[in-house]
Image (spheres, rainbow, N blue to C red):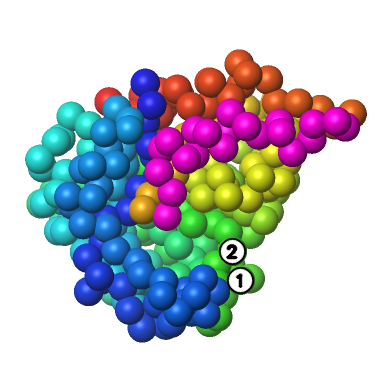
Amino acid sequence: MIFDCHTHLADPLHVGGEFLSDARRAWGDDYQMGCSPEQHATALKQCDGAIVLAFDAENIGFSVPNSFVAQYIKQDPSRLFGFASVNPNRQSAQKILEETCRDFGLRGLKLAPIYQDFDPRDKICYPLYAKAEELKMPIMWHQGTSFVQNGPLEFCNPVYMDTVARAFPDMTMIIAHLGHPWISETACVIRKQRKVYADISALCTRPWQMYNASITALEYGVGDKLLFGTDFPFFDCNKTIDSLRRVNEIVEGTKLPRVSEKVIEEIIHRDTPGILGLA
């Protein structure tokens, strides 16, 4: 099995405003963000299934409707699992999530404090978390940095997930992108909290971070809690797998430790649907 736990779907009309302008400042004036259903389906040929993420951050110009994701996953429900997104700042956010689960059959929740402008420890958000737990919807967190200038970096440290996990110990959570650059903090949290995992998405073009993240996870004994993900359309499965299998190249000729081939292949072939209760 090769399962991509972190992919995006977006019409170009879903991405604009501050998010797009800051992305172009960071990545170049010709930067475009968009992934059509056809492009996603083509990329899906590289793996056996994927999580597809909605995104509710219209305050910064990034808004992929839950209905858009739901319509797409209908074409291949045995391989595609949609995650809803509901900004906790919305009035009756928990009711919106319940209706989304009921009407669209989405299976998880995507949250991003830096994009949605909320402190994940704020108890105002707890009814939304409680509803996700009740509906058995794992929460994926973008709990790491970003190029968006007005995004509150102070809400992004993965250590904050320990507070949420202590309040909701039976809720499954994923810290996306290994919480980069706070990789060591992520390792501490996923070791401490039995139902918190991390994905490796978006690290394939950062070889030093990929290497350090892998070694840190091994030293903390949590290699089995790293999930395979790409952050498609930014990266795809083939590119991410190639990067993982070459992770030790950066330390060739040194005495630095190596990531074992066994660990690398276990990450690539991890049964993420089973771990998250999606299967």
Tell me residue 234's x, y (percent): 42, 55
Q: Residue visible at 29% across and 42% down?
A: 43
Q: Are marks 1 and 2 in contact (CB under 8 Å)?
A: yes
Magenta span includes 248: yes
Along the viewing direction, whichever of 228 and 104 lies nearer the viewer: 228
Please determine whether, in this image, residue 128 is positioned above or below residue 101: below
Question: Does the rendering let one see residue 255?
Answer: yes
In magenta, the rendered stretch is 234-254
Which residue is tagged 1? 153
Density class for disc 2 (Cα within 10 Å; few <14, some 14-19, many ≥20) is some
Determine whether the residue tagged by mark 2 lies in a helix, strand or loop: loop
Tell me residue 196's x, y (percent): 53, 38
Determine whether the residue tagged by mark 1 lies in a helix, strand or loop: helix
Q: Earlier in the sequence, mark 1 or mark 2?
A: 2
Which residue is tagged 2? 145
**Position of 66 compared to 237: left or right?**
left
Quadrant of the rendering where the C terminus is positioned: top left
